[in-house]
Image (tube, rainbow, N blue to C red):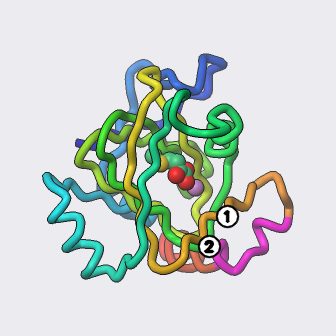
Amino acid sequence: MVNAWFFNPTDEDKRELHQFVPNQPVSLEELAKLGVEYYLFDDQESVDAFALQRQYKNRDLITIHKDKLPNYEEKLENFFTEHLHDDEEIRYIKEGTGYFDVRDHADRWIRIQVEPKDLLIIPVGIYHRFTLDTNNYIVALRLFHDEPKWTPYNRLDTATDARPSRDVYLKQFVAVEN
Ligand code: KMT
Ligand code: NI
């Protein structure tokens, strides 16, 4: 079951919980308002049925572990660099655990803790990042509509804010609040 909370930006390692004291939980409803969708699927058949319904035609499996992933350190650094994509980021967790951080409308980080059976959809155009936790291991099924469009556009690059996908996100999920 997924858990989410406001990220406390201390200088502890990114793999730590980063909770405020007391913790400030974030509900699934609040995540949905940001366009982040969550599902719990007990088995692979349910995921396959969901993928068919949503027309996620492509998939691959990623194992993030220091002995299993080529260029492990570099990839971890890239995953944790704030970015957006032009396609949804859909992840079904098979083994292990980790954190997806997403920005809310006030630009605060929300930390989303994922574990096996969680399926998380990070919408097009939202700023986000990923890190392993202190278990240092995750296996995830990555689903795509068509060919993977997983190019990360980093927020530090000023051209990123001008991408059409950012505009799509702001119009769909941010403008409605005001
Ligand atoms: C991504 O795009 O951030 C990844 O594929 C890594 C996280 S998958 C658990
Ligand atoms: Ni991403």
Name the amino acid, label 2: Asp
Question: Which stretch is magenta?
Answer: 159-167
Residue 104's disc number: none
Disc 1 marks which residue?
A: 151
Say above or below: 26 vs 161. Answer: above
Where is residue 134 drawn, in percent x and y? Answer: 46, 20
Q: Is residue 50 magenta?
A: no
Q: Name the side, left or right, on which 19 lies relative to 167.
A: left
Q: Name the side, left or right, on which 128 lies relative to 77.
A: left
Sequence-wise, the earlier of marks 1 and 2 is: 2
Where is residue 3 drawn, in percent x and y? Answer: 31, 39
Q: Secondary structure at mark 1?
A: loop
Disc 2 marks which residue?
A: 86
Q: Residues within 10 Å of mark 2 (few under 14, many from 20)?
A: some
What secondary structure prevails in the magenta region?
helix
Q: Which residue does the image show at 47% across and 37% down from the upper left?
A: 6
Q: Which residue does the image show at 49% across and 80% down from the upper left?
A: 146
